[in-house]
Amino acid sequence: MSFLRLVNVTKKFKDLRAVDRINLSVEKGEFLVVLGPSGSGKSTLLRLIAGLEDPDEGDIILDGVRINDIDPKDRDIAMVFQSYAIYPHMTVHGNIEFPLRMRGVPKNERDRKVREAAELLGIKHLLEKKAWQLSGGEQQRVALARALVRNPKLFLLDEPLSNLDAKLRIRLRFELRKLLHDELRITTIHVTHDQVEAMTMADRIAVMNQGAVVQVGTPSEIFNKPRNLFVATFVGAPSMNLLRARVINGHTLSVGDLVIRTEKILRLENKEVILGIRPQHLTIEKTGIGIKCRVGSFENLGEEVILHLETTEGEIQVVMSWRNLQDITLGQELLSKPIDKLYIFNEENKELLDVIEPNEYILSIKH
């Protein structure tokens, strides 16, 4: 049986279903990331598990015990908030030991646990400083240390890195994963809207949208086989290109002047579908076979450039090395050629129909 189970969990705020009949399992020692845009219900889900909100329906079961009616302080769950929620007038030592003092833990044991947690998070030298004197990264470590001293069954993180600058965020997401998962093996649920954070930290990702979990899988599964159009476009940067296409004769896709033939049987005969191609899976050619396009603009990212191209079937983006763009100009007419996976989505329900690998299709031009 899973360490944590959510069974048909629902939370309403008036007419809004912030969390809508969620079923989700988390294994002991797992690092699960809940990923979704703002307003998708991911923070509400975390608050339900912590006991800061009460579900209107469903059960939350932790280590075999239904915890719906158990007081938050008795759930043996530690939560770190986006705002850190540390006490600015207290010292770092005082902040870390606070939950232990509230539980009546003897002073000698409190001091030992505080030192151990501070050592783990590299803030032992800050123990006598006031919290208001700390940087954002130091405050975040204090909040983590305060949660760790409780030795909780379950660790909940509500976007704890979002207030940090980009360089510190990259370093701390690596350190956080290493500490909680690799060293302490604490079961962790981490909420974020940052897909890179999710892909680099998670054992599994639960993607949320409009209060529902739309897909759960490993980072590789989420990226390579998205269940629907929302997941496909939300995960991956730049976002997946989407083009109008038509299925012809069961084995052929028509996209503008481009014909894509495959041995696979494509469903929805003679129907419009949506063709998805990741920007990294396209290349640019001046002659040959490809989708006719016109150069609209460039985004220079240093080593790479995002090329924005206009086609009759919609705008697309291509990620290229800047070295390959020396003789490409705005307004130039080119051909964009698929070189990797093709994703076929049902135009009506937006669900994934099939993924066609690069060795499973042949390109040609309409005559």
Image (spheres, helix red, strand yellow):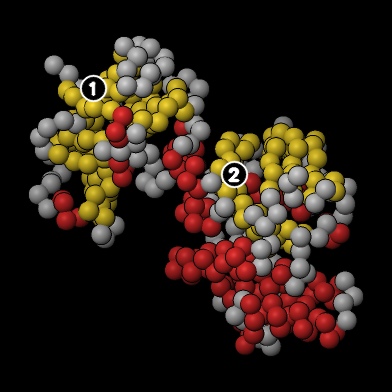
Left or right for 142, reference 48: left
Numbered badge on residue 7? none
Residue occupied by mark 2: 206
Q: Position of residue 119 (x, y in %)?
A: 64, 81
Label 2: how many Cα within 10 Å (few below 14, some 14–19, many 20+): many
Query: Which residue is nearer to you in this view: 186 or 41?
Result: 186
- The residue depicted at 35 percent of the width and 11 percent of the height is 270
Three-letter amino acid code at disc 2? Ala
Q: Earlier in the sequence, mark 2 or mark 1?
A: 2
Left or right for 112, reference 122: right
Q: Position of residue 137 (x, y in %)?
A: 56, 73
Vertical order, 356 against 308 (above or below): above
Query: Which residue is nearer to you in this view: 16 or 262?
Result: 262
Query: Which residue is nearer to you in this view: 311 or 224?
Result: 224
Left or right for 302, reference 264: left
- The residue depicted at 29 percent of the width and 18 percent of the height is 252
Question: Would you say residue 253 is visible in this rendering?
Answer: no
Give the quadrant of residue 342: top left
Label 1 secondary element: strand
Three-letter amino acid code at disc 1? Val
Location of the C terminus (image quadrant)? top left
Location of the N terminus (image quadrant)? top right
Q: Position of residue 85 (x, y in %)?
A: 69, 67
Residue occupied by mark 1: 259
- The residue depicted at 52 percent of the width and 53 percent of the height is 198
Vertical order, 231 against 33 (above or below): above
Vertical order, 219 against 23 (above or below): below
Asked whether the residues under the numbered discs 2 and 1 touch, taking CB atoms below 8 Å apart as contact, a structural biologist would say no
